[in-house]
Image (cartoon, rainbow, N blue to C red):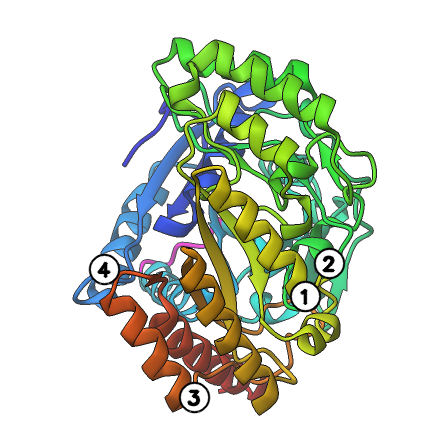
Amino acid sequence: MLGRCLMSDHAIIFVECDYNRYSLAVLTGILEEDERFENLDLHFLKFRKRMRSAHSNALHVAEQVAELVRRYHKLVLAFSFHTANVMAIGELIRDIRHKLAAHHIEHVLFVAGGPHPSGDPEGTLRLGIDVIVIGEGEATFPCLLDAYFHDKDYRLVEGVGFLRDDGHFQANVRPSPVDLSDFPPFALWHKRFCPMEISRGCPWGCYYCQTPFLMGACMRHRSLESIITYAERAKRLRCNLLRFITPNAFAYGAADGRSVNLEALEAMLKAVSGIYGKEQVYLGSFPSEVRPEHISAETIALIKAYCANDNLVIGAQSGSDRLLEAIHRGHGVAEILRATELTLNAGLIPNVDLIFGLPGEIQQDREATLQLITRLIAMGARIHSHVFMPLAGTPFFKSRPGSVDAHTRYIIEQLRGKQLEHGNWKQHERIARETADFLTLQKAGY
């Protein structure tokens, strides 16, 4: 439960879930390297909404928070979450608030950040949060902590959002986009490792995706020097596997984020495989993916030379050229088929991402996607299925959640039985519907 604990007057509690481990690893690393927080106590409370009784788990977390806050003069309770988790986090916040009120505890600042709070800051505040870190947290979050712990007005910090005394929402101007090289990719002292983020932002602007709208259209890259430095440090601490976080794996080093810089990509892969060994380096597979038009004989050759991948995750999303254009995807079906063929010819498995129920999808689009699936399976690919969920901060946030029609459902289940399809599409469909209902009720004031 506990991280570094020096028993100071101040502490931060990170609410840790399966889906925010990467974010917390980065934030922890930032606090480790910031001299202002060398005496700050860090605690990590695990919240598991998938337990048999999620409510009981929430109450247990609330009890732990109430126990910890008695030790400190000031305490920050920090949440980081996605839209898919807003309902569970909202209920957890309510339970913690009730528990603290019952004990007449008021010296706790509730802070939230991450994709959903950044995309819907006002709605998140009305869940019971005091202040939102909007967008990138590397610079804003430490400044917020420093202000709060030193009795300054944290509502003056750049990049935060809050409800004014009159109940209206206010968002401060956001700081300049961060340089990833200025911040650690994980926490060395706490040994909280995660895939290394090497690129951020995306120029394509797909309407369903939060990345370009929350992180900007200009892709920024971690420097080779920074990648090497932290790869070496992590290796010395027995982190023996290196994966990467990037919106588009083969765009590393490309100034426009739309092209491929083979020289920069090879220099990076050659360096990290020299540190870890080829057998421990993965790029273009989970948790990142590759745009289909960036798959070529040259980029695949780099994967074969320096990585241990047996697969590539190809972001396809639909088998309809009409729908791909409508969602601003920036490629067509022909590029998907070509990427799949090149991947297979290199002896790698293409895991092709598809999203069902996208806004504007009509029967002809569904038929086109099923036709593409048939062709991909015949070629030797695997299908990775998703169902559209409206994500905060995107052009599609106010759209209806996606659903899978009966015929498509039958085809997918047949493929799954043959181990030709994977993905949690049924869960996505349910969560998207429940989340949309929750947010509608919340907006109505229930």
- Is residue 228 within the magenta segment? no
Q: Residues within 10 Å of mark 2 (few under 14, many from 20)?
A: many
Residue located 37% across and 90% down the image: 406
Whether pointer 2 and pointer 1 mark residues with C-beta atoms closer than 8 Å, the reply is: yes
- The residue closer to the viewer here, 178 or 58, is 178
* Number of the label disc, if any, that sits on residue 213: 2
Which quarter of the figure is the N terminus placed in?
top left
Whether pointer 4 and pointer 3 mark residues with C-beta atoms closer than 8 Å, the reply is: no
Q: Which residue is mark 3?
A: 405
Secondary structure at numbered mark 4: helix
Secondary structure at numbered mark 3: loop
Quarter residue 30 falls in: top right
- The residue closer to the viewer here, 110 or 235, is 235
Q: Nearer the viewer, mark 1 or mark 3?
A: 3
Secondary structure at numbered mark 1: loop
Residue 288 screen position, x and y as percent: 53, 44
Mark 2 or mark 4, earlier in chain:
4
Q: Distance of mark 1 from mark 3, alpha carbons?
A: 27 Å
Q: Which residues are magenta?
A: 103-108
Mark 2 or mark 3, earlier in chain:
2
* Number of the label disc, if any, that sits on residue 57: 4
Q: Distance of mark 2 from mark 4, alpha carbons?
A: 34 Å
* Number of the label disc, if any, that sits on residue 105: none
Query: Disc 4 marks which amino acid?
Result: Asn
- Is residue 104 within the magenta segment? yes
Residue 266 screen position, x and y as percent: 64, 21
Query: Disc 3 marks which amino acid?
Result: Asp
Q: Nearer the viewer, mark 2 or mark 4?
A: 2
Q: Which residue is mark 1?
A: 393
